Image (cartoon, rainbow, N blue to C red):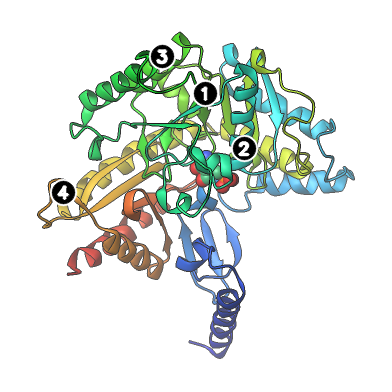
Amino acid sequence: MTLTHIDESAEKDLIVHRQQTRESAARTYARHFPIVPVRAQGMVITGADGRQYLDCLSGAGTLALGHNHPVVREAIQRTLDSGAPLHTLDIATPQKDEFTNTLLATLPDTFAKNARIHFCGPSGADAVEAALKLTQTATGRHGVLAFTGAYHGMTLGSLAVSGGRAAKTPVAGLSADVTRLPFPYSYRCPFGIGGAEGAAIAATYTQRILEDPNAGVVSPAAMIVEPVQGEGGVIPSPDNWLRAMRQLTTKHAIPLIVDEVQTGAGRTGSMWGFNHSGIQPDVVVASKAIGGGLPLAVIIYNKELDVWRPGAHAGTFRGNVLAMATGTATLRHIQALDLVNRAHTLGEYLLDQFRALKARYPIIGDVRGRGLMLGLELIEPTANTPEPAAAPDRARVVRQECLDRGLIVELGGRHDSVVRILPPLTITDVEVESVLSRLDEALSVASEKE
Ligand SMILES: Cc1ncc(COP(=O)(O)O)c(C=O)c1O
């Protein structure tokens, strides 16, 4: 190590130390990734100490094109050079007009032609709040149907419809209007059955809840669902089950909100996660990748719901002109290079490779996912429990061993035991193999832990 490297390493440690002593106890990723990024290109992040990392977190699924993609940089530069205002509340701009055209064109025609769009504050959670308020206003009802394992954000309304107990426990007044329904998580089936049968029972249970006049559930304003639960542990919703949810909600005139914050813009190997099942939602919630790495969030919904009042979901940061430009550039590039198809093909390949790893490492209980939204659920192979015991300690070892080998992967799911793989859609074949070999080594180390 040269003197410069020692200096850089010491400076990096100081920055991390200052963060630890000054920032909130609620900080998250910073705890596991003390890396101080200073440069990034594609899926490679360079830290202040000169170390390089392959980024399989992609800003929690935001960076569809990886870091600093040329089309994103060009869109920023062009917009800056044009002298356009960078902040315009929700006033019309050419950039917003172009973004709206581009976004609507990615949606099924039948949906887009009757759609309205609302620009929200720039987080997924704010768009979820908007979707809840919109459907409550339009139906005049209050209750929301939400699923076990769901993650919709950290604001009060979005937290109320989310599943994770830890974040909800200290917060007052969250659950009054939410009915929790079983999500068909095959590996840990709420009915102990799994597979297509478990999913069918989950659908029947929801039907009974809606149709039994003594089930205790007042007619709800909406059902909210993720096409693939991300934070819940990378659990794809089975297509038949999602179709059953659509049929039931249509039958009972309940607007169906599909939360595409993480699954949208090609991530699952289809432009939108709901496309896999062929359903048509009433409301689509979108954020993360649609902004091309800059903050942007919208809801797109059936115009029949558009009965809320001016200002019903206002917010200062709804006119981020740079984000509209980078969002347009990103969506266009995804389509021009058919990255959706590539996400599908690579996803299938990676799942095959993960299955091969599962055959070698008994600590892998399940592998699953769709497109480039993948997960490996770790278990204690020798635990004598009725269902496989979650292995959060081993998962943490995998995350750390990956980091030591220059690979960033995050955990999620029940007990944080699912290793999540969320590379950019632009990941190269060579990078795919590097991810696999580093992950393999990390799993090998984690397997040996007592
Ligand atoms: C499905 C889903 N909905 C909503 C959110 C919340 O988005 P944000 O963190 O931008 O508020 C997330 C974030 O991960 C998400 O995955």
The location of residue 125, given as percent across then percent down, is 59, 42
Q: Which residue is mark 1?
A: 222
Q: Earlier in the sequence, mark 4 or mark 2?
A: 2
Q: Residue at x 84, y 33 (%)?
A: 93
Residue type at mark 4?
Ala
Q: Earlier in the sequence, mark 3 or mark 2?
A: 3
Q: Which residue is mark 4?
A: 359
Crowd tier of the residue under label 3, counting other residues whose Cα lies within 10 Å: few below 14, some 14–19, many 20 or above: some
The location of residue 33, given as percent across then percent down, is 48, 67
Secondary structure of residue under mark 3? helix
Residue type at mark 2?
Ile
The location of residue 78, given as percent across then percent down, is 80, 44
Q: Earlier in the sequence, mark 3 or mark 1?
A: 1
Q: Which residue is mark 2?
A: 290
Left or right, 368 with respect to 389, comes to right
Left or right, 105 with respect to 58, comes to right
CB within 8 Å, label 4 to label 2: no
The location of residue 175, given as percent across then percent down, is 48, 39
